[in-house]
């Protein structure tokens, strides 16, 4: 049972990270676009802005892959144990519906 709580906690934490990271990514992409529109901007500044957005995008991709693996393991465990009772909704991360 302790392992299940670890999965739930980890999944909740990763989901909590995803929203602000996605928002930051959108801001970085927007900043790179603005640099691209400014004719006086240096090419290096534009490249740096694109690289920052790309780096954060890579981190978000890894986060999503990790979430996918953890959720698959958790769903497999639930199916394997044949849990018939409804899960404790207080432990389900916000935004997830059953």
Image (cartoon, helix red, strand yellow):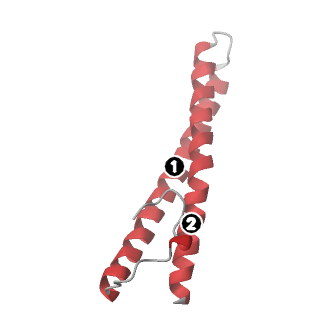
Query: Which marked residue is nearer to the observer: mark 2 or mark 1?
Result: 2
Find out whether the residues at labels 2 and 1 contact each other: C-beta distance under 8 Å: no
- Residue 71, horizontal then vertical, whole percent: 42, 69
Total count of labels: 2
Residue 53 to residue 4: above or below:
above
Classed neighbour count for the residue bearing mark 2: other residues with Cα under 10 Å, few (<14), some (14–19), many (≥20) = some
Q: Residue at x 61, y 20 (%)?
A: 34
For disc 1, the marked residue is 58
- Residue 52, horizontal then vertical, whole percent: 62, 39
The quarter of the image holding the C terminus is: bottom left
For disc 2, the marked residue is 12
Q: Residue at x 63, y 27 (%)?
A: 31
Residue 59 to residue 67: above or below:
above
Residue 66: assigned label: none
Classed neighbour count for the residue bearing mark 1: other residues with Cα under 10 Å, few (<14), some (14–19), many (≥20) = few
- Residue 15, horizontal then vertical, whole percent: 55, 59
- Residue 28, horizontal then vertical, whole percent: 61, 34
């Amino acid at each position: 049972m302790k392992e299940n709580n670890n999965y739930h906690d980890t999944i909740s934490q990763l989901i909590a990270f995803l929203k602000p990271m996605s928002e930051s990514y959108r801001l970085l992409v927007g900043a790179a676009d603005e640099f691209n529109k400014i004719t006086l901007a240096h090419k290096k500044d534009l490249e740096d802005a694109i690289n920052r957005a790309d780096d954060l995008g890579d981190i978000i991709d890894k986060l999503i892959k990790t979430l996918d693996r953890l959720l698959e393991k958790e769903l497999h465990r639930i199916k394997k144990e044949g849990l018939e009772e409804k899960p404790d909704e207080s432990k389900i991360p916000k935004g997830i519906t059953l």
